[in-house]
Image (cartoon, rainbow, N blue to C red):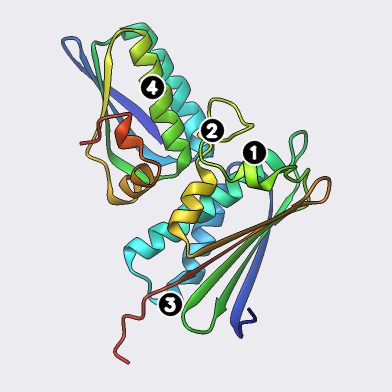
Amino acid sequence: MQHIVLDEAEVSFPSRSANEGFARAAAACFAARLDPTLEELADIRTAVSEAVTNAVVHAYPDKIGKITMRLRLLEDSVLEITVRDKGVGIPDVKKAREPLFTTGSEERSGMGFTIMESFMDSLQVRSAVGKGTTITMRRRLARRTAQ
Amino acid sequence: MSVTVTSRGSCLTAALSGDIDHHGARTMMRELEEIISEELPRRLELDLSDVSFMDSSGIALLLMAKRQMEHAGGTLRATHIPAQARRVLDAAGVGRLVPLE
């Protein structure tokens, strides 16, 4: 479905774990214009953290690569967040999205996609081995001002 | 981001503070592992009141601590869980594995 884009911002950063916090803060800052509730803001920060961490941990196993996050404000108070990398890609997206599945170490829970799915309205994962992964998430925020 | 430990008899409280994300959790996990293997507490309470943010890295941290405590014959519980962290733990059903208070 095509949406009218009301505003957008894009940030790129190296796949260093220190940038996970930066990505959360940038997304929360962009979302602030929609006057979100604290809970909505927390959900957005959490979903972004999962998406960016996936790219940091899995996309570039042996090097530091580029991660790009695009934030879009769509009509009807919909926030769209796209996290893109040009890393190794996910061989089996369906399996990767299953709860508890992880190819990571004991430090990973395998719940990243489950959290993204529960906290956002929609989650799309496109990936090609050797080319990279793009995660697109959307969340409609409640209108708190009187109509 | 830090771990502060207080001990009362065989019960140990570890107060975690700061962001428990992939970046911060690694150090925290190592610290907790050391604390558990050195102190061998009967009960370990993870006090999360000063946790400013938590994602699924926190789930892995809790499950790791639970495994280690079970291995040592002790129990684990998490207390004073902030709302944001609670939503993450609930979404993953962690309450079925670790008592959340």
In the structure shown, which secondary structural element does the residue marked by tag 4 occupy? helix
In the image, is A72 to the left or to the right of B89? right
Which comes before the other along the chain, label 1 or label 2?
1
Identity, as a three-letter code, of the amino acid under mark 2: Arg
Residue that extends furthest to the right in the rendered view of this protein: A130
Identity, as a three-letter code, of the amino acid under mark 3: Leu
Instruction: Using the image, tell me which numbered label, if any, was put on residue A34.
Output: 3
Which comes before the other along the chain, label 3 or label 2?
3
Q: Chain of mark 2?
A: A
Number of residue marks? 4
| Disc number lying in front (3 or 2) | 2
Q: Residue visible at 40% across and 42% down? A: B92
Question: How many C-alpha atoms fall within 10 Å of the one at disc 4: few (<14), some, or many (≥20)?
Answer: many
Q: Which residue is mark 2?
A: A108
x, y percent for residue B54: 41, 44
Q: CA distance from mark 1 to mark 4?
A: 21 Å
Q: Residue visible at 61% across and 85% down? A: A4
Instruction: Using the image, tell me which numbered label, if any, was put on residue A83.
Output: none
The image quadrant of residue B66 is top left
Residue A96 showing in the rendered view:
yes
